[in-house]
Image (cartoon, helix red, strand yellow):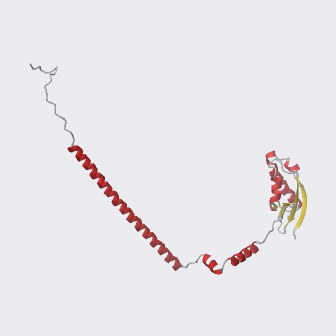
Amino acid sequence: MALERIYNVPLRKEFMKAPRYRRAKKAVIALREFLAKHMKADIDKVKIQQYANLLIWKRGMQSPPHHIKIKAVKQDDGTVIAELVGAPEKKVEKLEEKTEKAGKAEVGAQPAEKQEQEKPKRLGKKALQKEMQQVQGKIEEAAAELKEKIEEHQKEAKKVEGEEIKELKHEQETVKKHKPKTPKQPKTQETHPTGPQHQ
């Protein structure tokens, strides 16, 4: 049987011992210590619920409330659950009940044929081997197609290179053929200052 008590927990005396930027944290620690002492439980087994925690941190870390009114419930396994007095209660359902309800709702919503279709098929070894062979066949076909495309691309690239080389050769030949001739200058004998002078 669960033990249930309501406490007005004083926090100011404890959080005034901490620096301003740690006061809310110290208030939470003081609340845990108070409940562990008065409910005769381990401090690790004291659980502070959402609304109590929110009230402590409501005004920030520097100014928690001086007192807080708590409803503490000690369960059979020794855990103490502390919640703010007047906080809305959570409906706690067992996990098994939830799964049963969810299963019934799904069965009612969908016909049996659709459920069978949605279930993944479990395959044996032979079926898996067949699927693997089909997948490998598809991979090989894709690889062959890629090779063909690559070969076609290489052939086209060779053709383009050959055409470009022909054009370049043709341009070089035309430049050689049509190169304008420069007129030859007549050779004249120049007098060199060091050589013999002709008269």
Q: Looking at the picture, how far across and down is residue 196, in whole percent? A: 12, 20
* Residue 19 at least partly seen: no
The front one of 131 and 37 is 131
* Depicted 86 relative to depicted 196: above or below: below
Residue 184 horizontal/vertical position (percent): 16, 33
Q: Is residue 134 above or below residue 180?
A: below
For the point 72% across and 76% down, which residue is it? 105
Could you tell me which quadrant the N terminus lies in?
bottom right
Quarter of the rendering occupied by the C terminus: top left
Please give the name of the residue rendered at 25% of the width and 49% of the height, measured from the top-left corner: 170
Which residue is at the front of the view, 130 or 167?
A: 167
Residue 141, image x, y percentages: 43, 70
Residue 24 can be seen in this image:
yes
| Residue ID at (67%, 77%) | 110
Residue drawn where x is 81% and y is 66% of the image: 90
The image quadrant that residue 92 belongs to is bottom right
Q: Is residue 94 found left or right of 71 in the rendered image? A: left
Q: Position of residue 183 (x, y in %)?
A: 17, 34
